[in-house]
Amino acid sequence: MAALRFQVTEALIRDIALRVQGGAFPHVAAEAAGVPTEVFHDWMERGSRPGARDPYRALAERVRHAHGHARCMAEIALCKADPKAWLLNGPGKNSDSLPGWSAPVKGQAKPERRAVNLLLEPQMQALLASLLEVLAPFPEARAALAGALAARQASQPPEQGILPE
């Protein structure tokens, strides 16, 4: 579908903005005005770029303003009709970034931690096997390393090897 077939006019901007202000999603308002969603998204992207020029900049500004107005009016209506729902679900709801009037934000679950013996991990086992193999021509050094590792494993308390799962 050729985007050149469609043109942004003041009348089209007004039509789309009025539909959005009335509560329609912007892309649905554009479709209702005869503009395919893909073309509308392209126009909005062009109008949102730094240094954008009219008519795309005017379209993007008017649609954003109309969308904000519709959202604001819906929030006001909900606040008046059902203040509790507004407090629990609307702008009065607490979030990590904005304090609200509803219940405090629930804490995040921490990952479960488990004790892990790092000497028994496959990567560590491979490293230790390589060390023992390299030390094969040096029996005293190999025996000393093997003894030190065995003593370390036997004396290591479980909490020293705790890793997140």
Image (cartoon, rainbow, N blue to C red):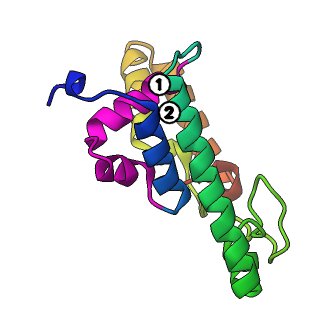
In the displayed structure, 40 sits above or below 127; it is below
Mark 2 secondary-structure assignment: helix
For image coordinates 49% across by 43% down, the residue present is 14
Numbered badge on residue 146: none
Q: Give the class, few, some or many, for how many residues have Cα within 10 Å of label 1's Cα (few <14, many ≥20).
A: many
Amino acid type, residue under disc 2 in the picture: Leu
Answer with the quarter of the image where residue 157 lies.
bottom right
The residue pinned by badge 2 equals 59
Q: Is residue 69 left or right of residue 145?
A: right
Quadrant containing the N terminus is top left
User: Is 84 in the magenta?
Assistant: no
- Callout 1, which amino acid? Tyr
Name the image quarter holding residue 125: top left
Q: Which residue lies most toward the front here?
A: 11
Q: Which residue is most to the left?
A: 1
Nearest the viewer among 25 and 102 is: 25
Q: Which residue position holds label 1?
A: 56
Of residues 104 and 82, the one drawn nearer to the viewer in this rendering: 82
Instruction: Answer whether labels 2 and 1 touch (C-beta < 8 Å).
Output: yes
Any part of residue 128 in sight: no
Magenta segment, prevailing SS (helix, strand or loop): helix
The magenta-colored residue range is 24-49
| Residue 43 in magenta stretch | yes
Does residue 109 appear left or right of residue 79 in this picture? left
